[in-house]
Structures are given as C-alpha cells and as structure tokens.
Image: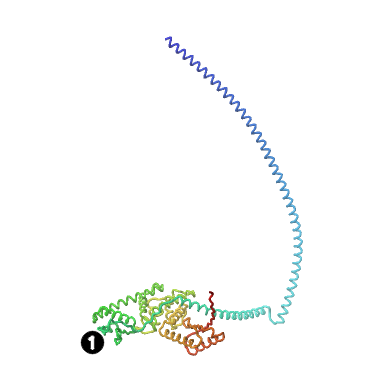
Amino acid sequence: MDFLLIVAITLVIILIAVLIIQQNKVKSVLQTTQQDRLDLQEKEKLLLKEARIKAIDELKIDREKLNEEERERRQEIARQEQKLAKREDVLEDKIQEYTEKDIQLQKKLDELLEKEDYLAEIVQKQTTELERIAGMSAEEAKNMLLEQLKHDLAQEQMQLIRENEAKIKENALEKSKEILSTAMQRCMIEQVVETTVSVVALPNDEMKGRIIGREGRNIRALETLTGVDLIIDDTPEAVVLSSFDPVRREIAKLALEKLIVDGRIHPVRIEEMVEKAREEIEKKIQTEGENAAFEMGIMGLNKELIKNLGRLYYRTSYGQNVLKHSLEVGHIAGMLAAELGANEAVAKRAGLLHDIGKAIDQTQEGTHVQLGVELATRFGEKSEIIHAIEAHHDDVVANSIEAVLVKIADAISAGRPGARRDTLEIYIKRMQKIEEIVNSYEGIKQSFAVQAGREVRIIVQAEMFDDLASQKLARDVAKRIEDELDYPGQIRVTVVREFRTTEIAK
C-alpha cells in the first residue's frame, strides 16, 4: 500500500515537473514569436518607407517628363499657328488678287457682249444683203450646199466601192486558190477505175464446156438468172461477163466463181449459187453504205438511202468509182465549208448524196440529178440537201453557199488528173507531148513536168546558154506548146541555168 502511494506521489511529482517544463517552453516560444512579430513590423515599416520614397521619386521623374512633353507640344502648336497665320496672309493676298482679276474679266465680258451684239447686227445686215444679191434665203442656200455635199459624198463613196471591189476580187482570187489547194491536198482518196465487163479466170479450158453445158443449158440458166451476158471465146482460161448493171455483173461473177470452186455446174446448182451470191452482194452493199456514212460522220441517214449509197460501190462513171467520188466530194465540200465558215455538216451530207441518183439511173427513167432529188425527197432529207443535189450540175441556180461548194468539190474530184479514164489518157498524152517538145532542143540537161502538167522546168547546160539564150528558149518552148497542144488553163515554162565549180582540198 505504501509502495503504491509512493509511486502515485512520484507520478504526480513527475507530471507537475513536466507541466512546469512545458509552460516554460510555451512562454519561451511566445516571447520568441512576439519578438519576431516586432521585428516583422519594423521591417514592414522600413519597406513601406522605402517604397513611398521610391514612388515619390518616380512621380517626380514622370512629372518632369510630362512637363517637358507639354513644353514641346506648346512650342509645336506655336510653330503651327505661325504657319497658319502666314498661310492666311497669303490666302488673303490671293483672294484680293482674284477679286481684282474677276472685276477685270467682268469688264472684258461686258465689252465682248457689246461687240457680239454689234457683230450679230453686222452679220444680220450682211446676210440680208447676200440673200438680196443671191436671190435666195439662207435656208435655201444651206439646202443647196447639203445637196452638193451629198452628191460629192456619193461620188466618193462609189469610187471607194470600186476600189474596194477591185481589192476584194484580187484578194478573193488568191484566197480561193489557197482554200481549194488546201482542201485538195488534205483529201487524198484513191481512185478506182472499172469498166462494164468483168473477167473470171478459169482453172483450165475444159471448164468452158462445163459452163456452157449440154446444148447450152447452163449458160442460158446463168444468163437468165443474172441478166448478164457471158462471152466465151478463144481467150485462154477466161470468161468475160458483160453488163451495164454493175451489181448484176458482180452477182454473176461471184456466182460463177463459186460454181467453179464447187465443180457441180447444173441449172439447180446455178440457181442456188446465184441466190447466195445475191445475198452476199446485198450484205456488201449495206456494209459499204454504212461505212461511207460512218466515214463521213453522218448520222440519221435513212436505211434506203444507205442501201442506195452502197450500190454506188459497184457503179462507175467514166471509169471513176462513184462511191469513192462521192466520199471525196463530201470531204472536199466539208473542208471548204470549214474554211469559209459555212455549214460543214450540210456540205458533207450534200456532197456524199449528190450522185445518189446514179444508184438507180440504169433501171429507172430520168437523169441521175432528177432521180437523186426524188430519192432525197422521198426519204426525208432537208431542203438544203435536196437543193444542193439539184444544183450540182446547174439544173437549177445554186442559192446557198453549201450548194456552190458541192458543185466546186464535184468539179475538183471529177477533174483531177487520173480520176477518169478519158482525162487520164489525155493527161498522159499531154505530158508525153510536152516532153517531146522540150527534149527536141539541144543543150537540154533535164526536164520535169510538175504541178500536174501546169509547169515545165527545164535544166539546161550552162556552157551552151547565156541569159538571153535562156529567155529565148523559154519563149520558144511556150510558143510551141501553145501551137501544138490543147490544154486547160496555163502552162508555166521555167528555164534553169546553173553553173557549179568544184575543187578538192587534199
């Protein structure tokens, strides 16, 4: 019991000692805190004082700057006021000067008005006197002068028109030559020359007897079914088919070739082969017509017109294939229309269809122009196409530029050397005759016919000709060509004399 009491008393004493120690620490901390607070307050006062002093200094500096700027502004304003004052003085002087000038001008204006009234009075008197002397009023004199001016202007206008017409004709001739030559050079279509007969080659002469048949039944059947004359003569290994209808002739040729390959030749087989050949030719005709329309870029052409167009593939005119000729005319007419700003589509279509009547002119009455117009009208072609077809051989007067272009293109295609058999023969003969004339002279080195026989170039030996002799040769050749040849247009004769010297450096 005593032990416990002693422990308790000891604990109480320790607790009291601890409390006393803690109290002393708290007092020490409080004292330290109070001292720190006082130190902080002192520092704060010092900082506030320093900040106040610094602010006062900065304020003084700013105030001095503002005062300096204000002084500068006042000086600038003073300078500006001085300038304005000077300008006001100058303006007042000018206003005074202008006022004086205005007064002077007003005086002069009054003087001019007085003089104008005086002159108007004088002019009126003179006009009255002139009217009295001339015997007409001023209005009548003005009308007479206007009439005279109109007459003079009309004369000058007519003179200008004549001069311009001459220039236009001169330029139009050159331009037309350029356009035509360009169109002809751009359109190069092969010309196919055919005749009214076709030759079928035979493997041997024994085939002739089989074609004739017993008592001529095979040849009669073939001629009856095709409408073509078979000429079997002494020509070795060949049979000639003659007909003015090219389609019938082609059918007969194809059927006979099929019979020769097949080897069985009798009336029944002939009928079968003729029918097959007819079907093939009809397909060929349709294909050629479609190809022609496609090549020309023509759409919406009636099927019957396409078929008749294809028949032209087997039609010739003076040895010229009509379909090829029609394509060429279409191309040339289209190019001419493009050059001249006309309707290119109409020119092409009319050029392609211009000879469509030749597809049926061997089976129906009428000219190919009349039949072509009838076909185009029947199958819905436009009036400008029909007119171009009708006018391309001057059956009617061409009243559209496209019709004129089709007519020109037709003449170009048909008149080209080599396009038609008779023209080609004449062309060759003319070229040969020109060569004979040129080569008959001595001293000719070479000679060339160029531009389809329109020009002859002669190269002579330089040592045998001088300038005068060359001129004489050109004149003599031209004279002989005029006297001995018939030719369209003109033939230019050009003599070339060239002298060359060559040395070799070794």
Is label 1 in a helix, a strand or a loop? helix
Residue 502: percent from left, percent from top: 53, 78
Q: What residue type is disc 1 on?
A: Glu
Q: Residue furthest left?
A: 214
Could you tell me which quadrant the N terminus lies in? top left
The residue to which callout 1 is attached is 215
Is there any visible trace of residue 350 in the rendered image? no
Q: Nearer the viewer, residue 148 or 383?
A: 383
Q: Quadrant of residue 141?
A: bottom right
Q: Nearer the viewer, residue 91 or 116?
A: 91
Is there any visible trace of residue 216 in the rendered image? yes
Residue 188: percent from left, percent from top: 43, 76
Seen in the picture, residue 39 relative to 381 is either above or below; the reply is: above
Query: How many numbered discs sit on the rendered protein?
Result: 1
Q: How is the image coloured?
A: rainbow
Residue 460: percent from left, percent from top: 52, 84
Residue positioned 41% across, 74% down in the render: 296
Seen in the picture, residue 459 relative to 82 is either above or below; the reply is: below
Q: Residues within 10 Å of mark 1 (few under 14, many from 20)?
A: few
Residue 28: percent from left, percent from top: 56, 21
